[in-house]
Image (cartoon, rainbow, N blue to C red):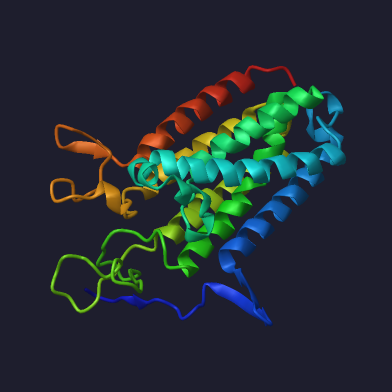
Amino acid sequence: MLAMIPFPDISPELFTLSLGGFEFSLRWYALAYILGCLLAFRISLTALNRPSLWAGDTAPMSKDHLEDLLFNCVLGIILGGRLGYVIFYQPGSYLNDPLAILRVWEGGMAFHGGLLGVIFAGWLFCRRYGLSKLSTADVVVLGAPFGFLLGRIANFINAELWGRQTDLPWGVIFPGDLAQDCGQLTLYCARHPSQLYEAFLEGAVLLAVLLWLAFRRSALRKPGLITGVFFAGYGLGRFVVEFVRQPDAQFISPGNPLGLALQVNGYGLTMGQLLSLPMILFGVWLIQRSRKAIA
């Protein structure tokens, strides 16, 4: 091994306040959610304030609509993310202890579940106010990668969702017995900082592409185009990173050391890749459909 990077000494908690018997801690992960939502809101509002970006030179909703939509989407993220984790990753465990579903402070959120929650919340919102579903989706996803960027960095700070073992010079020595369990007699186990790979692909790169398309290439004039690029871009980025991301422990066994959720003739896909494939296909279909629209 040429080099290894020790995990930086960063506390998962930004600060802790104690008053009498009450204690409040602000964690980096919570801050990432808050800032991600606020920055996404600001980007969407900036786009809505420029009617020339939209089909018919008319923004699809008002600022008041956007504020209500943000609240609905946050609920969709939390409820969908939690239920998605329960259904996709640990159904058996939660069937044995259903009340554990409510203990969200113990961790356990799934992006794909949160996405389904946002889709359902947005669909209900559009039905209630009679808004265009595709244009509303474009509004929602335009700044969403900000949340991915900050959220994945928070995952890194929390030393969670790390990658597979590597001997690359930027491999990180994550703390904890699980991270250091590489099945070999080595002093330290270096792993891919897959959280940072995802922050770059799902966050920075995808955000740059969406903003360029929206503000420089008039993509918002074709309802659904931005949404299609978002789905395809996120799905592709997640699919690629899954090759070096450590799968959840429940998928790993002596006969399945790579943690594949589907195997055929020695080849297979992780659960993250299985869930990302429909996103990629849907995104490509939506891109093709929206490109035929008349601006």
Q: Identify which residue, 92 or 230, lies in the foreground.
A: 92
Q: Residue at x 35, y 74 (%)?
A: 175
Q: Residue at x 41, y 36 (%)?
A: 275
State whether residue 226 is above or below residue 168. above
Q: Identify which residue, 167 or 111, lies in the foreground.
A: 111
Q: Identify which residue, 116 or 234, lies in the foreground.
A: 116
State whether residue 134 is above or below residue 217. above
Can you tell which quarter of the image residue 239 is in?
top left
Q: Residue at x 63, y 46 (%)?
A: 144
User: Can you see residue 207?
Assistant: yes
Q: Is residue 234 left or right of residue 166?
A: right
State whether residue 193 is above or below residue 234. below
Q: Identify which residue, 153 or 217, lies in the foreground.
A: 153
Q: Residue 190: x and y, percent?
A: 29, 70
Q: Residue 14: x and y, percent?
A: 60, 75
Q: Residue at x 82, y 39 (%)?
A: 48
User: Can you see residue 131?
Assistant: no
For the C terminus, the quadrant is top right
Q: Is residue 38 left or right of residue 264?
A: right
Q: Residue 234: x and y, percent?
A: 50, 42
Q: Is residue 69 left or right of residue 117?
A: right
Q: Residue 256: x and y, percent?
A: 18, 46
State whether residue 88 is above or below residue 150. above
